[in-house]
Image (spheres, helix red, strand yellow):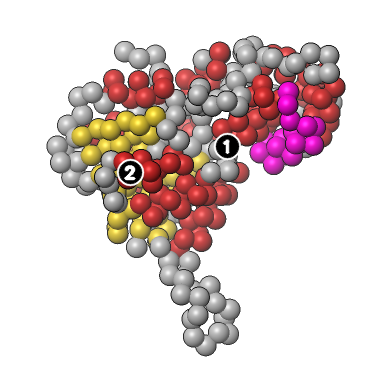
Amino acid sequence: MSAFHHVSVLPEETIEALAIRSDGIYVDCTLGGAGHAGRIAERLGAAGRLIGIDQDELAIAAARERLADAKCRVTLVRDNFRHLRDILAAEGILSVDGILFDLGISSPQIDTAERGFSYMQDAPLDMRMDQRSPRSARTVVNEYTADELTEIFYRYGEERWAKRIAAFIEEARKTHPIETTGQLVAVIDRAVPKQVRAKGGHPAKRVFQAIRIEVNEELTILADAVSGAVHALREGGRLAVITFHSLEDRIVKKTLKDLARGCTCPPRTPVCVCGHVPEVRLIGKARAASARECASNARAKSAKLRVAEKL
């Protein structure tokens, strides 16, 4: 059995949201270890089809093993979900019945030290979800200017000490490149005032989040990816998106809200001239994980599920 093990959040709520038809076509854009995909496959018959997308080769391997006995047709693609339209076109698919995004980082990626995602384990600075990507965390830390580092720490990590941390990194790399997560954590420790570190929470958490987001362009592509997914749905098809922090949830919420809007003309305009019509209807409010799930899976505490249906 593959060592890639990841506990999916909001599993039942997500399956309910997708309103799965046994003969439908469904896409899991963030396949991981096929936790959600496995549940989707269980509800699909021989006429159904599941397409799983992930840029991590270990996730693809684990999913292939888990989905080996699925009754439906399964297609696994190693790619970024930003290419969803091209992936569907290559498969000759015009529209689908449901699409899922489970955003964030998988537990196996965090737990595998050599991937360099964790500030708790010393490892080479990497953080690439797709190992084929030329840009790693080492690139960001050693080649970005102090101003560029300040910007990503503040924007993607909401780090109040962004400028000071960036300055300390710039000074440290004058002597030698920062090669490992341990070296980076040590620099951050020196940059963040002692009284701040003592208040709780690891001082490197927000910086590591910011670097990971930058390396993998997680937020840059998100709005376009959500819009593209809506366009790929058939009428009545469902989109389900699970977010894990306020930055990505804000983007998803705004994108879906914009897609659900009708006429955008000023209120006093006698006749609509914009021609804008809503593309989706929002299904309820964002759903959070139950207290029971949060108790058994800490990752679920920050998760939010948003659902929309194509009009």
- Decide which of 131, 255 is in the foreground and name it: 131
Figure label count? 2
Picture coordinates of residue 44 (x, y %)? 20, 39
Residue 122 lies left or right of residue 37; in this view the side is right
Q: Quadrant of the N terminus?
A: top left
Query: Which amino acid type is marked by label 2?
Result: Leu
Instruction: Give the mark nearest the N terminus, 2 or 1.
Output: 2
The secondary structure making up most of the magenta span is helix
Residue 52 sits in which quadrant? top left
The residue located at (51%, 61%) in the rendering is: 258
- Decide which of 48, 42 is in the foreground and name it: 48
Mark 2, residue position = 88
Residue 60 sits in which quadrant? top left
Query: Which amino acid type is marked by label 1?
Result: Glu
Picture coordinates of residue 230 (x, y %)? 40, 53
Mark 1, residue position = 217
Residue 156 on the magenta segment: yes
- Would residue 11 be visible to someone looking at this image? no
The residue located at (50%, 49%) in the rendering is: 224
The residue located at (31%, 41%) in the rendering is: 90
Q: Residue furthest bottom?
A: 270
- Mark 1 burial class by Cα count in 10 Å: few <14, some 14-19, many 20+: few
Q: Which residues are magenta?
A: 142-158
- Mark 2 burial class by Cα count in 10 Å: few <14, some 14-19, many 20+: some
Residue 193 on the magenta segment: no
The residue located at (85%, 22%) in the rendering is: 171
Residue 22 lies left or right of residue 145; in this view the side is left
Picture coordinates of residue 280 (x, y %)? 40, 60
